[in-house]
C-alpha cells in the first residue's frame, strides 16, 4: 500500500503527473543548500569583517612567500659564475638541454620563441629583475611569486637551470615575430665568448 494517495494533477499522452510530496531527504538537502548559500554569501560576498577571497589569498601568499624564503635561507641558491653561464650560451650540447627545459617549463608563459606571452619578452635587452646571467639564474631559481612566476630552484636540477639560463642568453637579439613590447630597465647584454 502506498504511503500517499496518488492524486493525478494532469496527464498528457498517457503520462500522468502525481501530486505527491518530495521525499524528506531531498527536502533536507534543498533547505540545507539554501541555508548554506545564504551563510556563504554573507561570509564572503558581503564581507562581514575581513573574510574575503582577496584577504585569504593575500594571507596565503604571505605564508607561501615566507616558506619559499625559509627554504632558500637553509638552501641558498649559488649561481654558477657568469663565465660558466656565458660559455654555455655558445655550447651546442648545453643549448640543446636548455632549449628542452625552456620548451617544457618556460614556453607556456614566455612563448615558444621567448617572445613573451603572459610573461615578458626574453629576447630584448629589457629586464624586470636584472639582465645579467647570474641575476637571471637567481630570478628563475627563486621565482617572482607576486607576478605569478613560480620558484623553479626546487623543481629543476642546478645543471638544467644553468643550461636554461645559457639558452635564454643565447636568444638575446633574436627578434622573434610578434614580440611583446619591452618591459623593465634596458641593460647591455654581457658579451658571449668567441667559439
Image (cartoon, grey):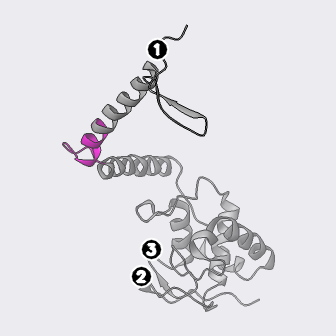
Real-space Cα separation, disc 1 to disc 2, in angstroms:
74 Å
Residue 66 or 45: which is nearer the viewer?
A: 45
Q: Secondary structure at mark 2?
A: loop
**Depth-wise, is mark 1 or mark 2 nearer the camera?**
1
Instruction: Give whichever of discs 3 and 2 has the lower sequence position.
Output: 3
Instruction: Give whichever of discs 3 and 1 has the lower sequence position.
Output: 1
Left or right: residue 124 compared with residue 47: right
Seen at 33% across and 34% down, the residue is 34
Residue 76 or 117: which is nearer the viewer?
A: 117
Q: Are marks 3 and 2 in contact (CB under 8 Å)?
A: yes
Task: Give the labeled residue for mark 2.
Answer: 184
Q: Secondary structure at mark 1?
A: loop
x and y percentages locating residue 17 in the rendered image: 51, 32
Of the numbered discs in the image, which one, if any, rests on residue 129? 3
x and y percentages locating residue 42 in the rendered image: 24, 41
Of the numbered discs in the image, which one, if any, rests on residue 4? 1
Instruction: Give whichever of discs 1 and 2 has the lower sequence position.
Output: 1
Classify residue 183 by image quadrant. Answer: bottom left
Say if 143 sits above or below 183 in the image: above
Q: Which residues are magenta?
A: 39-52
Say if 23 sits above or below 111 in the image: above
Left or right: residue 101 compared with residue 30: right
Amino acid at each position: 500500500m502506498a504511503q500517499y494517495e496518488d492524486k493525478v494533477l494532469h496527464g498528457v499522452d498517457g503520462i500522468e503527473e502525481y501530486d505527491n510530496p518530495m521525499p524528506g531527504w531531498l527536502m533536507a538537502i534543498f533547505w540545507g543548500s539554501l541555508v548554506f548559500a545564504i551563510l556563504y554569501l554573507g561570509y564572503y560576498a558581503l564581507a562581514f569583517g575581513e573574510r574575503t577571497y582577496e584577504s585569504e589569498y593575500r594571507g596565503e601568499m604571505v605564508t607561501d612567500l615566507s616558506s619559499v624564503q625559509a627554504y632558500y635561507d637553509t638552501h641558498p641558491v649559488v649561481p654558477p659564475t657568469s663565465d660558466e653561464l656565458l660559455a654555455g650560451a655558445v655550447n651546442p650540447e648545453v643549448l640543446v638541454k636548455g632549449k628542452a627545459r625552456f620548451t617544457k617549463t618556460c614556453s607556456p608563459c614566455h612563448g615558444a620563441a621567448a617572445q613573451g606571452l603572459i610573461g615578458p619578452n626574453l629576447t630584448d635587452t629589457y629586464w624586470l629583475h636584472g639582465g645579467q646571467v647570474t641575476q637571471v639564474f637567481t630570478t628563475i631559481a627563486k621565482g617572482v611569486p607576486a607576478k605569478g612566476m613560480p620558484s623553479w630552484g626546487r623543481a629543476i636540477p642546478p645543471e638544467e637551470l644553468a643550461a636554461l639560463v645559457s639558452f635564454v642568453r643565447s636568444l638575446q637579439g633574436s627578434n622573434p615575430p610578434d614580440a611583446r613590447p619591452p618591459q623593465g630597465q634596458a641593460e647591455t647584454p654581457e658579451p658571449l665568448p668567441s667559439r
